[in-house]
Image: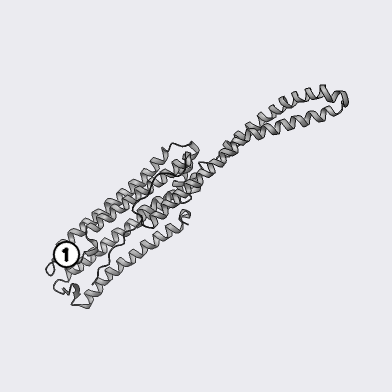
């Protein structure tokens, strides 16, 4: 009988994706503050009013006493307010030009940062060997982009290390003739299953530590206070569900090892009633065969659950669209 290998979950990497790119634009808004945006506008409006009074008033005095007074005294007041308004409007336009330019540049950097995050996410989905953490954007948006991409890279490395160790432990060939030995010797199988249990728990702990470190690193990002609060809020919003997904994923990994352990115990209890024929495990009693197949079917079911979990996380992530 062919042993179905475990399809190790990508939830270790998906966790950071869900937490940090559930809405990249929200993180990249750098804590939009209506009061902060209003301050330069109000300042420009106030200074423009003063400039209008000073420049418009001075211009009116010159024009009035040199031209208007001699021809039409009544037009003086009309010209006075017209000149003040024109001077104020011109000054306001000059004052707000840099503000508009800064907003345009910020939007451009946010677009670049989102492009970089989406690109990294898609590489993660496609099974890339590595993710470039260098940001495309500059300023606060670039810092946030680098933070997300760096943690995606760390998550991918953690995931790959887990896969490497679980494969090296021999899960894919756990019930091979070489492991089962002569007839009913399960000592090699028992040892491998213990190793696999330790590997799953090791990387469960490491993934949780990594998730906690994300919060600590986000709190130290060298960006504006509003931007830092926005990043932390985005992570906190997704954290509860992501923690539940991460726990479920690692519980599934542990359950797969438990199913193989159950199959090993079945073989131990059926000593003398199974053997290898032409390199395949064959059972003498149909009940033993059905029970063994039941454990393998459970592994398939758990693997399908993991795939569904990954698909749901990807579907909930706009960055992957």
* Pick the front one: 136 or 8: 136
Q: Residue furthest front?
A: 67
Please name the residue shown 47% across and 46% down the image: 113
The percent coordinates of residue 242 (x first, y second) are 40, 52
Label 1 CA crowd tier, 10 Å (few <14, some 14–19, many 20+): some
The percent coordinates of residue 232 (x first, y second) are 45, 43
* Pick the front one: 154 or 107: 107
Q: Going by the image, does 204 lie left or right of 53?
A: left
Q: How many marks?
A: 1
* Pick the front one: 43 or 138: 138
Q: Quadrant of residue 265?
A: bottom left
Q: Going by the image, does 73 lie left or right of 43?
A: right
**Circle 1 residue:** 179
* Pick the front one: 207 or 93: 93
Q: Is residue 244 visible?
A: no
Q: Going by the image, does 313 lie left or right of 283?
A: right
């Amino acid at each position: 009988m062919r042993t179905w290998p475990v399809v190790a979950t990508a939830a270790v990497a998906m966790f950071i994706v869900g937490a940090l790119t559930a809405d990249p634009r929200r993180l990249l808004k750098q804590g939009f503050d209506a009061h902060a945006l209003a301050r330069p506008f109000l300042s420009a409006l106030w200074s423009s009013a003063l400039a209008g009074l000073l420049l418009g008033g001075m211009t009116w005095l010159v024009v009035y006493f040199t031209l208007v007074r001699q021809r039409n005294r009544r037009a003086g007041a009309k010209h006075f307010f017209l000149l003040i308004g024109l001077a104020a409007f011109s000054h306001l336009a000059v004052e707000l030009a840099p503000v508009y330019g800064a907003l345009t540049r910020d939007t451009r950097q946010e677009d670049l940062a989102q492009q970089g995050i989406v690109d990294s996410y898609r590489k993660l989905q496609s099974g890339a060997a590595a993710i470039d953490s260098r940001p495309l954007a500059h300023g606060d948006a670039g810092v946030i982009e680098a933070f997300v991409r760096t943690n995606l890279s760390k998550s991918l490395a953690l995931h790959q290390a887990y896969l490497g160790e679980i494969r090296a432990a021999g899960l894919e060939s756990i019930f091979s003739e070489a492991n089962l030995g002569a007839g009913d010797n399960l000592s090699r199988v028992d040892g491998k299953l213990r190793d696999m249990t330790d590997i799953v728990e090791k990387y469960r702990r490491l993934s949780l530590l990594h998730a906690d470190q994300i919060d600590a690193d986000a709190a130290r990002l060298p960006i504006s206070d509003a931007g830092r609060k926005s990043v932390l809020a985005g992570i906190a919003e997704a954290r509860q569900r992501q923690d539940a997904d991460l726990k479920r994923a690692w519980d599934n990994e542990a359950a797969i090892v438990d199913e193989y352990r159950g199959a090993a115990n079945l073989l131990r209890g059926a000593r003398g009633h199974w053997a290898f024929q032409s390199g395949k495990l064959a059972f003498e009693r149909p009940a033993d065969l059905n029970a063994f197949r039941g454990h393998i079917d459970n592994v398939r079911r758990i693997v399908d659950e993991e795939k569904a979990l990954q698909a749901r996380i990807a579907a909930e992530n706009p960055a992957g669209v």
